[in-house]
Image (tube, helix red, strand yellow):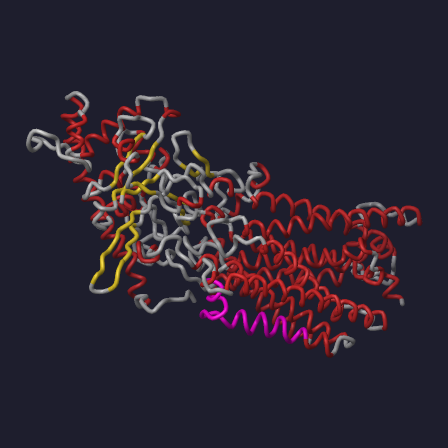
Amino acid sequence: MKRALYVLWAVAFALGAWGVWERLTLGHRLAGYGSYVVWGLWVSAYIYLVGLSAGAFLLSSLVYVFGLQRLERIGKLALFTAIVTLLVALLSIWFDLGHMARFYRVFTSPNFSSMMAWMIWLYTAYFVLLLAEAYLAFRPDLVRWSRDAARTPIQRVVARWLTLGRTALDPATVAAEGRAVRILGTIGVPLAVAFHGGVGALFATVSAKLYWHQSIVPILFLTGALVSGGGLLTAVVAFAWAPRDDAWRQLTALLGRLLLVLVLVDVLLEWAEFSIPLWYGTSPEGHLLRQVLWGPYWWVFWIVHLGLGTAIPTILLVARGRDPIAVGTAGLLVAATFMSVRLNVVIPAQLEPALRGLERAFVGPRLVFQYAPTVHEWLVTLFVLTVGAALFWLGARILPLIDAKEVVR
Amino acid sequence: MRSTTADDPTPHARATAPRRQFLQTLGAGAATLLALDVLESLAAAPAAAAPPPAAPAVQATTPGPPPAGGPDPAPQDVLVRMRADLERALRKPATQRQWVMVIDLRKCVGCSACTIACVAENKLPPGVVYRPVVEEELGTYPHVTRRFLPRPCMQCDNPPCVPVCPVAATYKRPDGIVAIDYDRCIGCRYCLVACPYNARTFDAGERYTDGTPETSPVERLPAFEYGQRRTREHDASPVGNARKCHFCTHRLEAGLLPACVSTCIGRATFFGDASDPDSLVSELVAKPNVMRLKEELGTQPRVYYLL
């Protein structure tokens, strides 16, 4: 089983690397987006992955803010998840840039009227905070690992490096660091809300696209982040938590209940998103929503999102809420299928010509109001996902993601 | 993998279509440009020697009653008037010019000479177009009519594309033109989605001769947008950038009208300095039958349409 997974990963990575090679040598020539549908799979993957990051982080931080002590044990795991998903999200959007080498300019010459500039600065702040918080949260265990003869040499060396030379383990220092983690976590909540709300606002502020230009869009981004990030965290805890004891069962049951609430709240907001403009059938963005529901990609909404990503997880969480594997499966389904929601945000808005007849005015392969990702785009996204999987795999092996005391118990 | 519509040509035809279109474009564009530039300079020659054209001469070619006292002996081409307007504007400090474009939809015949001239002038690659002519069929058979709507960049006074740029690579010039700094643009394409006129396009790096044994020499020639000499190389700007109509700033600076104006066979496109009360465009934008596209968005376009 494990061997098969390794082989699968290696094949996926090789294919993805081929896609990246194409991207680096041929630029955007093989991509399916163009001058009218300008953002495609990579932008969708980016908002999907940053959503996972913000969601995983918010869920873990809400623990600190609202004192849900039972969830504190997954704090480090959630931080690590948030860091990995943010890193691969940035990788995805980097490939989408017309000039990859110029990305630093968002820092050297920012334009703060741009919601995109705000988003970039907010996620930079969020990333720095994640790193600081992770350092403080991991350090005591890293010090212990670096001295633990039972650890592999690599684990000890990496642990020693990551302590950055601070090896104090006296209760006062550890307690002070614990307080610092709590403070950072508390700061992180509004930061993550602002950052991911900013991603939503990046779309919602564009008045040229009525499909995006809705006040509910940034809110939907936040609930979407919580649902998908929560699903991912639930799946990680259910499947990757080493000691399969009572604590694990209680933890997954609790995460499952949280996830159920989040899924239902998201369904409610989605009902608002669709029903309000569609009710009388006359709103300007109505036909784009109908396109999502009944267009050629109807199955993305009905089967992938509502079926696999909402109905089945809800049934699993209601009927088998105490079974960690069922809860984990529900979480995995929610997290994995959420990409369909992101695609249905990014693509449909761009399918409408700004002026009637523009689609026939000057024809060319990139001057069309249709889009489907090309094989090349899928390969690059595959690369991004395999990098994420590799980082998770590495982290699980060389980092104390779960408290040392948990493992002992 | 790209989705296609029923009216899409076959894959083979699709592969060759851009090339054919390019060759047609190039031939027609070059010919029209050449012919009209010659015409324009011929027409401009007497204008330069003679005193500035008087108002009655203009009336002969602009809507309005014919001058009293019989037919006009020598109706003057509006290009001559606009050329004189342009020269006058260029003598002013750059910050005092306010370029506007006026398009008379009653005169546009939908020949697309402007689109083609623009492609030839700016060496536009596949997927990039600055001034398409949108065709719309109105009415129900047999009572149908067609309307042609050339759509350059609106050079909005409140441009939605400018504040969205994360690196301030696109900006509004004092003369009203919305410009792009190709060397600063990172290619995020936020400005493309923000434009309510779809007036910005993305240069994905393709050539019309891709997939053929040889690159056309024409495609290796430099373009002179924003007064800069740029040859489209592998992934050097403008490849990977947002691109848009800039009212042919490089031609304006050389005292020439934008390519689309010079080449308009119906004389339906007018260009000039709106801050000059004597200019032709100032007269035209004061007419009651003038409108702007999507006025309700508050973008304040600098392109006016006469209905």
Image quadrant assignment for residue A399: bottom right
In this rendering, the answer to whether B17 lies above or below B175 is below
Q: Quadrant of residue A56?
A: bottom right
The residue under the point 30% across, 21% down is: B91
* Residue B199 picture location, percent across and down: 38, 47
Residue drawn at point x = 78 percent, y = 60 percent: A401
Q: State the residue at coordinates (24%, 55%).
A: B146
Taking the view exactly as shown, the residue that stands out farthest to the bottom is A319
Residue B34 lies in magenta, yes or no? Answer: no
Q: Is B109 rendered above or below residue A300?
A: above
Nearer the observer, B5 or B18: B5
Q: Nearer the viewer, residue A276 or A220?
A: A276
Q: How many marks overall?
A: 0
Per the picture, the main secondary structure of the magenta-coloured stretch is helix
Q: Is residue B26 left or right of residue A239?
A: left
Q: Report the magenta residues as a range.
A: A288-314
Q: Is residue A86 above or below residue A228?
A: above
Q: Position of residue A3 (x, y in %)?
A: 67, 74
Q: Position of residue A239 (x, y in %)?
A: 74, 71
Q: Position of residue B19 (x, y in %)?
A: 28, 56
Query: Quarter holding the N terminus of chain B?
Result: bottom left
Q: Is residue A293 part of the magenta span, yes or no?
A: yes
Say which quadrant the C terminus of chain B sits in. top left
Q: Nearer the viewer, residue B166 or A145?
A: B166
Q: Residue furthest right?
A: A171
The answer to whether A351 appears left or right of A203 in the picture is left
Which residue occupies the foreground of this view, A405 or B251?
B251
Query: Could you tell me which residue is drawn at 15 percent across and 31 percent down?
Result: B43
